[in-house]
Image (spheres, rainbow, N blue to C red):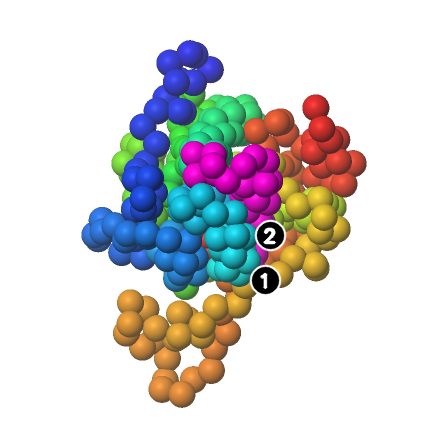
Amino acid sequence: MTPSQRAALRRDPIRHIVWRKDRLEVLDQRLLPRRAVFVTCRDARAVARATHDMVLRGAPLIGCAAAYAMALAARRGRLREVLAAEPMLRAARPTAVNLMHALDHMLAVARSGPESTLAARMAEAAERYRQDDLEANARMAEFGARLLAPGSRVITHCNAGALATAGIGTAVGVIRAGWLTGRLSHAYACETRPYLQGSRLTLWELMKAGVPSTLITDSMAAHVMKTERVDAVIVGSDRIAANGDVCNKIGTYALAILARHHGVPFYAVAPTSTVDMATPDGARIPIEERSPREVLEIFGAPIAPRGARARHFAFDVTPASLVTAIVTERGVVSPADEAGLKKLMSPR
Ligand code: MRU
C-alpha cells in the first residue's frame, strides 16, 4: 500500500457524533439515507437513550458515544455523577462489548485523579478513545485487504462501516482498502432485515466511496454464492468470545454456513475492544432481543396480519470453526481460536 493510500484510510472521518463540550450531537441513523438529522444529547441519559433507540449504532461507535457520555457526566467535576451515569449507559444495549470496554476505560480515567481535573481528563480521554478507534480502523483495513486476491468479489452483512465506527469502518474498511489497492472488484451488501443497515447504510457508504456494489436481500446470498463468483465473506462483530466464536448482526451465522458450504473464506474484522476474553464462548454472549414491532412493521407500515406474533433476535453467534480469520488492529488471528486470541490480547 502506498503512503497516499494509507493516508486515505484515515482521511475525513464521517461526522456522525460531534463533541461540543457541553453536548454531543448525534446523527440519527434511523433516518438515513433519506434525511440527515442530528439529535442533541446534553447528558449521559440522553446518550443512553439514543443508543438504546438506535439513533446511533455499530459496536465501536456505541463505545465512542459512551465515552463522550461519561465526559458529559463529568462536566460538573463530581465523581459521583460519573459513577451514577455508568450503570445506566451499560444497560443501553447488552451485546456489543465495546460499550463495556469504553465504560471500563472511562471509569479508570475518572478514578485516576482529583475532581478538580475530572472534567478535562474525561473530555480528553473520550477524544483519545475516538482517535484510537479511527487508527485501529485504518490498520484493520490494511491487514484485511492483504487477505484478498486481486479483483476479489465479496459479500458483507449489516453495516460495519464508517457509520458504525470512528473511522473508515471494520468490514467496510477492508472493502474500501481492497478497492483502493485493486484487490477488490465488487461488493454485495445483504439488506439486513429488519433494520436494513445493509441497504440503507452500507450501500450508501459504498456508493459514496465509489466501490462497485450491489444490494441483495438476505435470502439471496446462497444463490449468489452458487451462481456468481464470490471470493470472501467479510463482516464486523459486536463481541468475540475467548474461543473465537463471533457474535454479529442476525443473519451472519447463516452467511458463515453458506460460505463454508461453498468453500468461501469467512473473515470477521473487529478491533481488540470487541474481543471479550472474560466470556469463554459464544453461548455466554447476551443476545439482544428487540421489540417484535420492528419485525412486524417496516417504517411504521404493517407487513403481517394484525395480532401476528414475531421475535426479533438482533444478533447471532458464528462458531469459531466457521471463521477463517479474525482481523484486528494488532494483526490477523487464524485459525480463530483461544490460543491465537490469548496471544493477541496478551499485554505488549
Ligand atoms: O444493531 P446494530 O446496527 O448496532 O448492529 C451492528 C452490527 O452488528 C455490526 O456488524 C457490528 O456492530 C460491527 S460494526 C463495525
Does the magenta run of residues contain 79? no
> Can you say whether 293 is above or below 6 in the image?
below
| Residue 57: mark | none
Q: What's under tag 1, amino acid-wise?
A: Ile
Q: Nearer the viewer, residue 209 or 120?
A: 120
Judged left or right of residue 169, residue 263 is right
x and y, in percent, of residue 171 in the image: 48, 38
- Quarter holding the C terminus is top right
| Residue 287: mark | 1
- Crowd class of label 1 (few under 14; some 14 to 19; many from 20; radius 10 Å): many
Q: The magenta stretch spans which residues?
A: 94-120
x and y, in percent, of residue 145 in the image: 51, 27
**Number of marks drawn:** 2
At 29% from the left and 72% from the top, the residue drawn is: 300
Judged left or right of residue 152, residue 265 is right
At 22% from the left and 49% from the top, the residue drawn is: 36
At 39% from the left and 38% from the top, the residue drawn is: 162
Determine whether the residue tagged by mark 1 lies in a helix, strand or loop: loop
| Residue 247: mark | 2
Characterize the magenta stretch by its predominant secondary structure: helix
At 34% from the left and 32% from the top, the residue drawn is: 13
Determine whether the residue tagged by mark 2 lies in a helix, strand or loop: strand
Judged left or right of residue 29, residue 266 is right
Ligand 1 within 8 Å of disc 2? The answer is no
Q: What's under tag 2, amino acid-wise?
A: Cys
- Crowd class of label 2 (few under 14; some 14 to 19; many from 20; radius 10 Å): many
x and y, in percent, of residue 282 in the image: 68, 55
x and y, in percent, of residue 310 in the image: 47, 77
- Farthest residue, direction top: 3
**Mark 2 or mark 1: whose residue is earlier in sequence:** 2
Q: Nearer the viewer, residue 282 or 217?
A: 282
Q: Are marks 2 and 1 in contact (CB under 8 Å)?
A: yes
